[in-house]
Image: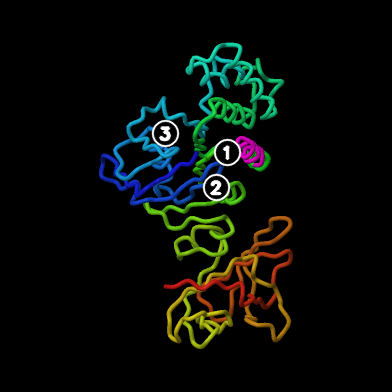
Amino acid sequence: MSLVFEHVSYRYPNGTQGLDDVSFEIRRGELLAVIGPSGSGKSTLLNLVSGLAFGHSGRILLNGKDIATIPIHRRNIGMVFQSYALFPHLDVLDNVAYGLKLRKVDLATRREQARRLLELVGLGDRTHHSVSQLSGGQQQRVALARALAIDPSALLLDEPLSALDASVRGHLRDQIRQIQQRFGATTLLVTHDQEEALTMADRVAVLQQGKLLQIGTPREIYERPATRAVASFVGLSTIFPATVVARDKINVGFAQWTTPTADRQVGAAVHALVRPEHVEPDPPEGALNRTLGRTATLRYFGALTRYDFLAEGATQPLLAESPVPARQAVAVSPARILLLNS
């Protein structure tokens, strides 16, 4: 069971471009996370798959069938909303069994299946509770169980953890991922939380202004962004404009750094990406790419401190993080500098 987008474009009635020639596949059992700034097209993807929006060009294929003309109630898609959307007049068991009731499954069968799912999500002792008696994390697990009860061809997760406290998010994130893998559900996750996307997903897609900028594993997206736009959006970084001045040598304005330049010609304009965790504080004299300066704007996070390092002659700070901040110098390993074409 796969979900495929083939050259999908969509324009809203007011003329706004929602999606622009987007193509990708979510493979059977895969969890694909879609991230991007507001207005990038994330919600448009969900709405088109679920049937809440229509009128796109291109094709959306679910298990090889174009779903454009299939009514919402016949698409066999499970959806977990940001707001949970549980029914307050039904108890937990009947909330989970609701989709089966609509499918005319007999009472005994649907309740047995709902009980099994509630056991799976750790709520087997809450079957006859009102949903108002549950915590936010418990309500989200009920919503997930309800979505899975119908054995969906695809599972859609719309910002599933955004309404929860940070202390709950991490644990529930792991639970949702484990349940999704156990069911082998082909899953599209839309989120603004990059940590959520990188830790939960098999692959991540980055959208901007309706265009698909890059799709790849979380490691590929973070460590090998294809463009400056992806590099700027995903994770924290500093990006310096630079020029290739010799083989494996670049000028970043305030210093010349050693880093692989591949087949780029001398004089080529590039951008040098540095992640904060790759900045070494107070390296020994003689270390490659050792840069003098001073530390400013400390941000304490317990196990590490994130800070701005103001290199001598630089016009922008270098974002760094380490257990102990640098005092007067930093260095970046040549292998840890990623060059992006301008």
Q: Quadrant of the C terminus?
A: bottom left
The numbered mark, 2 or 1, whose residue comes first in the sequence reads: 1
Q: Dot 2 corresponds to which residue?
A: 193
Please report whichever mark, 1 or 3, sits nearer to the chain's N-terminal start.
3
SS for dot 3: helix
Across and down, in percent, residue 191 comes to 51, 44
Please state the horizontal and vertical placement of residue 196, each as a whole percent of the image. 59, 47
Q: Secondary structure at mark 2?
A: loop
**Which of pointers 3 and 2 lies earlier in the amino acid sequence?**
3
- Which amino acid, mark 1? Leu
> Distance between the Cα atoms at labels 2 and 1?
9 Å
How crowded is the residue under tag 1: few (<14 C-alpha within 10 Å), some, or many (20+)? many
Query: Relative to the observer, which residue lies in front, 90 or 62?
Result: 62
Q: Which residue is mark 3?
A: 50
Are the residues flagged by discs 2 and 1 in contact, CB closer than 8 Å? yes
Q: Which residue is mark 1?
A: 161
Magenta-drawn stretch contains 182 = yes
Q: Secondary structure at mark 1?
A: loop
The x and y percentages for residue 195 are 59, 50
User: With respect to residue 234, does 11 lie above or below?
Assistant: above
Residue at horizontal 49%, vertical 36%?
Answer: 154
Magenta stretch containing residue 75, yes or no? Answer: no
What's the magenta region?
A: 174-184
What is the three-letter code of the residue carrying label 2? Answer: Asp
